Image (cartoon, rainbow, N blue to C red):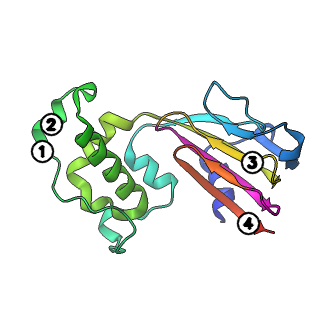
Amino acid sequence: MDMRQRIIDLFGLQESDFNKGTWNTRDVQGEAYLALHHAYTSGQKVVTTQINTQEELTQLLGIASEDTVQSVEGSAPSISAPWPTEKNTVPVRELNQQDEKQLRQALLATVTGQGYQVSSYREILNKRYFPMQVGVCTGDDIVVQANSPLVLNPQGHDLLIVNHNSITLEPGAEIQVEGPVAIYVQTFTKQ
């Protein structure tokens, strides 16, 4: 089963959730959004759901379990020290800037298949980032034009999944990513 179908099945998407046909960003004045953020109007339907733990997130992303993953050098940031267990009871709002940086690096390590390197972070990651809202935008085709960039905008640390048959970038076109985004396409074309 391909990843696109896996996403549809995993979230239990229905026919009515599917964006049919070709969506061309030229049909939008200026920036064309796929967004979870309430301040922006999404150009296509985005279905929202929730992920409750980092384990659910790694399963969704198709990442092997921690005990079967081999290290891939350079694929995730290096975390120099384990998370101190006494900090697991600290309220999230009391974490300092360095703590937040370490947590972002640990979450990145987790979603790039390096979760076994940051297992001491599991409890605090679940406390800090979960439950996580996930937006899924699935459909046929997107064509992005130079004068109307595609802007992928989740909200905060929540995740936006773009799950389409194809995305075509016409000459000079661009995709702007404004937060955690996973893109699954059968065909990606840059003209």
Residue type of the residue flagged with mark 1 = Pro
Quadrant showing the N terminus: bottom right
Residue 130 among those drawn in magenta: no
Sequence-earlier tag: 3 or 2: 2
Contact check, label 2 and label 1, Cβ < 8 Å:
yes
Residue shown at 44% from the left, 54% from the top: 58
Q: CA distance from mark 3 to mark 4?
A: 16 Å
* Mark 3 or 4, closer to the camera: 3
Numbered label attached to residue 191: none
Q: Earlier in the sequence, mark 2 or mark 4?
A: 2
Q: Which residue is mark 4?
A: 188
> In the picture, residue 153 is in which quadrant?
top right
Mark before the other along the chain sequence, 3 or 4: 3
Amino acid on which the number 3 mark rests in the picture: Pro
Element carrying mark 2: helix
Furthest-left residue in this view: 86
Instruction: From the viewer's perspective, tell me whether residue 174 is left or right of residue 113.
Output: right
Q: Is residue 42 above or below residue 169?
A: above
- Given residues 26 and 159, the one toward you in this image is 26
Badge 1 element: loop
Q: SS at mark 3? A: loop
Label 1 sits on residue: 84
Residue 172 sits in quarter: bottom right
Are the residues at dot 3 and dot 2 in contact (C-beta closer than 8 Å)?
Answer: no
| Structural distance between the alpha carbons of marks 2 and 4 | 43 Å
Which is nearer the N-term, disc 1 or disc 3? 1
Query: Residue 149, labelled with which disc?
Result: 3
C-alpha span from label 2 to label 1: 6 Å
Magenta stretch: helix, strand or loop mostly: strand
Pointer 2 residue? 87
Residue type beneath disc 2: Lys
Q: Amino acid at mark 4?
A: Phe
